[in-house]
Amino acid sequence: MSEASATAQALADQRLKEAYFTASQTQLVWTRFRRQRAAMVAGAVLVVLVLMGLAAPFLSPYDPTIAGRDKDYQFGAPQIPMFCDHNGCSLRPFLHTLERTRSIETNFRWVTKVNPEKRRYVRFFVEGWTYHLFSVELDLPGRAFDLRLRGIELRTHLFGIDEGGIHLFGTDSAGKDIFSRTLHAIWTSLAVGTIGMLISFFLALIIGGVSGYFGGYIDGLLQMITDAVRTVPTIPLFMALAAFVPPEWSAETRFFFISIILGLVGWPTLARRIRTHLLTERNQEYVLAAQLCGASSGHVIRRHLLPSFTSYIIVDLVISFPYMVLSETALSFIGLGLKEPVNSLGVLLQAVTNADVLLNYQWHFIPALFFIALVLAFVFVGDGLRDAADPYSEQHR
């Protein structure tokens, strides 16, 4: 190696060291996170799923409710667009015409026959059912509180077909499009998890912060409350709440209620971690200096103590998010959470408990694949962020 090359390499190494020691915490975490392939792939999958949930009305060719059902294609198999058949190839994707009949040979079950001589072409950016982006509707009993926020009204959808219907994931017993229902279910489960996580996050910050900073009898009292919440059995609790929920509550109200309950029972773990950190940090010199300068307790907690482990709080939230989604899905699956006509992953998974569906209509398992991908993506991203936020993780490798 020549002297010039050695000098250039030394300067490059020096710049890297300077960049490392002058980088912010966020930059360091992102640099470590990018080295983990599994976490990066999971992050890409998670971004795609979140975008699919956000753009569910635009990506859905049909209304996922009973209003958008296909009466002539109940329990219909998935339809995959093609470009070539025995008549030749086409630049536009197409489907063959379907003809459904019943006969004694099939015990009067619906049988779908494909007519390969007729094509139905797929079209993009078509006009369809009307939807509102970012709309919120909440009706509580007694009209005590009604919230209606209507977003932008649109009718454009990504794709459609010039004749009949196109159902990429098939249809259910009512003829509703499973593809459209799956996209809206992803958004519903993410929304429930987000609301529940935010509620538990603020409760954990307040209770854990006060408990860890003040200590003494305040800490003892708050820890008694925390332990009491942790010992509450969740399934009997939700069974009791399901019996308490009035039948006249709308689907949106039930959705909001389940989100709040998930948040109210999900804060103790994070509160314990915040308390443990504050008990360690409250006697540090920078905290004592702030107190001597006359800073209030709230200011010390908000501006000095909590920012010292913000990255760990974010990691904890990401890791706990899939458990919120799992809780909503499990409750809806056993009939204690969201119910029809709400489209959630748990509601869609209820259909697979039917023996007839298990034997004859296996495409109802497709939403389960999205559910598994969503949970695993959050788990891998959370593990990657946890390792990236730990400054000592590289020393153990």
Image (spheres, grey):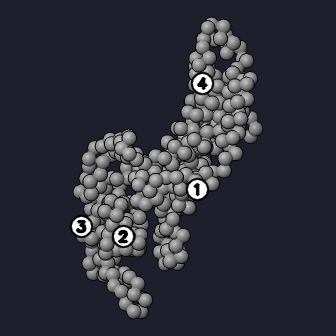
The residues tagged by marks 3 and 1 sit, at their Cα atoms, a distance apart of 47 Å
| Kind of residue at disc 2 | Gly
The residues tagged by marks 4 and 1 sit, at their Cα atoms, a distance apart of 39 Å
Q: Secondary structure at mark 3?
A: loop
Q: Picture coordinates of residue 351 (x, y %)?
A: 49, 68
Other-residue count near label 1 (Cα within 10 Å), few / some / many at <14 / 14–19 / ≥20? some
**Location of mark 1 (residue):** 239
Vertical relation: 300 (above or below) 247: above
| Kind of residue at disc 4 | Pro
**Location of mark 2 (residue):** 175
The residues tagged by marks 2 and 1 sit, at their Cα atoms, a distance apart of 31 Å
The residues tagged by marks 3 and 2 sit, at their Cα atoms, a distance apart of 19 Å
Vertical relation: 107 (above or below) 142: below
Other-residue count near label 4 (Cα within 10 Å), few / some / many at <14 / 14–19 / ≥20? few
**Location of mark 4 (residue):** 307
Q: Secondary structure at mark 2?
A: loop
Q: Secondary structure at mark 4?
A: helix
Other-residue count near label 3 (Cα within 10 Å), few / some / many at <14 / 14–19 / ≥20? few
| Kind of residue at disc 1 | Met
**Location of mark 3 (residue):** 162
Q: Residue at x 57, y 38 (%)?
A: 200
